[in-house]
Amino acid sequence: MTVTSRRFGLSAAMTTPFDQDGRLDLRRLTSHARWCLDNGCTSVTAFGTTGEGASIGNSGREQVLGALAGSGIAPEAVVYCVAATALHEAIVQVRMAYDFRAKAILLPPPYYFKGVSDEGLFDWFSQFFTKLGASARDIILYNIPSVTQVALSVALIGRIKDAFPGIVTGVKDSSGDWAYTQQLLADHKDLAILIGDERYLAEGVALGGEGAISGLANVCPDILLGMIENARGDTRVNQLVDEVLRHPVTPAVKSLVAHRTGQDGWRHVRAPLVTMQPSPAAALGKTYDRLFARAAA
């Protein structure tokens, strides 16, 4: 089955390179962003979970956006992920992205307080959109409860969407809960539903999903693009996801990028994350080579 063209497509949840002292490696970052775009991604997502966005302050974010623009990467090829719990801080970050003319905003819920109600979350999003004002556009809600410990219910998404029509345009679902994903696809056909767990990507697209923001797009975007275009699963991707999930995810993805590029500097992470040790990193690289039958480039 061939799926018609999608409004969103494939975005790499772009991992962020640092040097051994934790400083941004902007040259390596822009080169990687270009590689992702040249190998099947329609956009890159900066400052997401895989990109350690919660560890990058506003000055660092400005540096990254400046480097991307300076390297000739079009703003409309960049999705900007917010990492803030205070309304003021979240709005500052979004205005930075709008000034850059980013394609869209990936917006998680406020994630410090746990056990909050849908009513409290609705109040937070309502205040956020109201304070942002007429500039609000292209918001992709980000559901990743394994990280935030704050889930966005299907009903809450509908309430936010209805209260602010035309502003919320999509949802990235990284719940890993297929029943939830199915309900999201059934109830919100007017939104771009993006699959965060690559193991459900083909099934999600077959049910109307519009693509993915994917950590594995840092290493195999061509394979993932084929899954989106044809709504056909790939057991190799499922196996690689299973292997990655045996480890802390972001250091594991960075180790795969280091393996693919032959650049060991990609393995550096910012505290509190810890760089993946050489032995498991090498084993993960061997799994990648075995599954995709090619040596690291």
Image (cartoon, grey):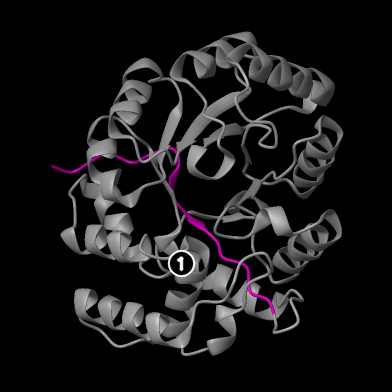
Q: Residue at x 67, y 29 (%)?
A: 137
Chain part drawn in magenta: 1-18
Q: Which residue is mark 1?
A: 218
Relative depth, front residue between 247 and 101: 247
Dot 1 lies on which element? Answer: helix
Relative depth, front residue between 88 and 218: 88
Report the side of 5 relative to 118 (left or right).
left
Residue 17 position, x and y percent, is: 63, 74
Q: Residue at x 82, y 59 (%)?
A: 62
Residue 80 position, x and y percent, is: 66, 48
Residue 183 position, x and y percent, is: 33, 21
Report the side of 112 relative to 159 (left or right).
right
Main secondary structure found in the magenta portion: loop
Label 1: how many residues lie within 10 Å, few (<14), some (14-19) or many (20+)? many
**16 within the magenta span:** yes
Q: Amino acid at mark 1?
A: Asn
Q: Which image quadrant for residue 99?
A: top right
Q: Which image quadrant for residue 85?
A: top right
**261 within the magenta span:** no
Q: Residue at x 66, y 36 (%)?
A: 111
Residue at the outermost front position: 115
Residue at the outermost left position: 1
Q: How many marks?
A: 1
Is residue 144 visible to us here? no
Image quadrant containing the C terminus: bottom left
Residue 84 position, x and y percent, is: 75, 41
Name above or below for residue 156 compared with residue 219. Answer: above
